[in-house]
Amino acid sequence: MPAAAQSQATPENAPYAPFKIGEGLYYVGAADYASYLLTTKAGLIVIDGGDQATGRQVVANIRRLGFDPSAVKVLVNTHQHFDHAAGLAELKSAAPGARLYVSAADAPIVEAGGKGDPYLKGPAYEYAPTKVDVILKDQQTVSLGGVTLTANITPGHTKGCTTWTFPVTVAGKVRQALVHCSSSVLPGYRLVAPETYPGMAADYEKSHRFWLNAPCEVFLASHARFIDLDRKKKALDAGKLDAFVDPAGCKAYYQASYKSFRSALEKQQAAAR
């Protein structure tokens, strides 16, 4: 579950040194709140901003890698929760020319600074409102300088949760990368009537069908812990250039995720009977 307050110094937003995952693909996030940088011949793309503190770190990490944060032209978001969207304002401030792309269901909440979420309510989960420049539909593509990302709307965790996919070269081979939004069922989410939002359980079912069948070679996610980032980074540092190529881990993650969702649903259904 997200930390109680974005301003609190927590392990999730502790600084983390940026590093290269594949050709033109870098990790620029915090210890757990993830963010990714894609470099293109026409500018930079950033996926997720973390919380406010992580957003500042992302800007610093881009500089640390030798790139100019003002060259960010595209910002995309996995979902509107503060630990992934609060840092977007920091990135927009550093890159005034960047355009922010967010799903139709999550965009109003990003623009309201976290207000309007059906579950995470109150000042602890609010952040600086950020203008959304492009409203995304399912399967819409975002392109810059020869790099194309596909927005796969995978609702459940939020109504507009977006899983991003794109090709990337790792260890000399073109692979399919997937940046997982989130499939976790937060404590307190209601999957039976009255659902946290109407259709939530059906959305989780539909999204898991996508995740369980989607090509996923380079497994990335909105939280570093989802992909065991520390272990893979150690392997990368030890010389394993394809450390983040993990189709088996991706498949196992989604199988476990679906099992966890079904367990939560069945418990709530039993309690409602």
Image (cartoon, rainbow, N blue to C red):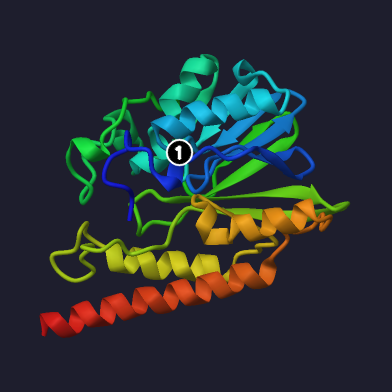
Q: Name the one closer to the observer, 131 or 228.
A: 228
Q: Position of residue 63 (x, y in %)?
A: 65, 22
- Give the quadrant of residue 236: bottom right
Residue 252 is left or right of residue 67, and the answer is: left
Q: Quadrant of the N terminus?
A: bottom left
So how many labels did they put on this image?
1
Mark 1 sits on what residue?
Answer: 50
Q: Residue sitting at 38 percent across and 63 percent down?
A: 184
Answer above or below: position of 62 versus 154.
above
Q: Is residue 30 left or right of residue 249?
A: left
The answer to whether residue 244 shows anywhere in this view is: no
Label 1 SS: loop
The x, y position of residue 44, in whole percent, is 66, 27
Choose top left, top right, bottom left or bottom right for residue 132: top left
How packed mark 1 is, by other alpha carbons closer than 10 Å (few <14, some 14-19, many 20 or more), is: many
- Residue 123 seen: yes
Could you say which is closer to the camera, residue 147 or residue 35? 35
Q: Is residue 70 above or below residue 254?
A: above
Drawn side of residue 21 relative to residue 15, left or right:
right
Q: Residue at position x 18%, y 85% from top?
A: 270
* Of the pair 229 and 194, the residue shown nearer to us: 229
Taking the view exactly as shown, the residue that stands out farthest to the right is: 172
Q: Residue at x 26, y 34 (%)?
A: 126
At 11% across and 85% down in the image, what residue appears? 273
Residue 233: percent from the left, percent from the top?
69, 53
x, y (%) of residue 105? 34, 44
Disc 1 marks a residue whose amino acid type is Gly
Q: Nearer the viewer, residue 95 or 107?
A: 95
